[in-house]
Amino acid sequence: GESVGLHLPTLSVQEGDNSIINCAYSNSASDYFIWYKQESGKGPQFIIDIRSNMDKRQGQRVTVLLNKTVKHLSLQIAATQPGDSAVYFCAESYNQGGKLIFGQGTELSVKP
Amino acid sequence: NAGVTQTPKFRVLKTGQSMTLLCAQDMNHEYMYWYRQDPGMGLRLIHYSVGEGTTAKGEVPDGYNVSRLKKQNFLLGLESAAPSQTSVYFCASSYSPFTEAFFGQGTRLTVV
């Protein structure tokens, strides 16, 4: 969803459903992308990453898809669980710069 | 291993006071980052370092200075704190631009 003011986009899903979180990145030169999960009061934790020479990568219950044509990244979580409730951020990096830039984030709420 | 450790965890400053936030990592990482996170928002890059003795500006560098005199430490300084610098500050480190960044637990700073 679109962000308005200081409110994070929110995705609400039922336990057991699949979740899809989207991210539009800004720099066409970015060549490494990461998804992070942040629980309340904690620092971000790594979920999965993908290099720009790939368009899909799978982990345990998570899949990241990369569409470089439209500069879009998505995170798919299979069989979403209450413990998946958190804020999810995408981040981009490129070799020549060294910066690691974060997107705004999406709050995932899982209903039991 | 401790990973990434931030000191202090909480601090209250008066407007105009100065302070230094310390980030220490024990993973021999080259890259280190300082971010700030405001309520309902993502992480914004303040400054970063691509190796001992180097620093570079991020997205929101004004009002902050940094130093990387030792590879394992990255210091963030506020010379004259302002209420607009009230935020949660996160430090992170990574081996390279193509590997995940590990985050500290954050420092909650309030400027009154």
Image (cartoon, grey):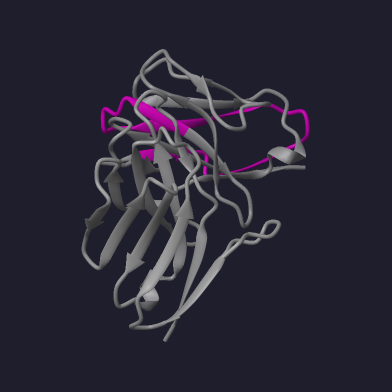
User: A90 above or below A110?
Assistant: above
Q: Is residue B80 inside the magenta stretch?
A: no
User: A40 above or below B66?
Assistant: below
Between A10 and A22, which is closer to the camera in this rendering? Answer: A22
Residue B13 in the figure: left or right of residue A36: right
Q: Position of residue B27 (x, y in %)?
A: 26, 33
Over which residues does the magenta segment extend? Answer: B4-33
Please state, as top left, top right, bottom left or bottom right, where the N terminus of chain B lies in the image: top left
Residue under the point 43% across and 70% down: A85
User: A36 above or below B13?
Assistant: below
Between B98 and B23, which is closer to the camera in this rendering? Answer: B98
- Quarter location, residue A88: bottom left
Q: Position of residue B77 (x, y in %)?
A: 59, 25
Residue under the point 77% across and 28% down: B16
Q: How many marks?
A: 0
Furthest-front residue in view? A69
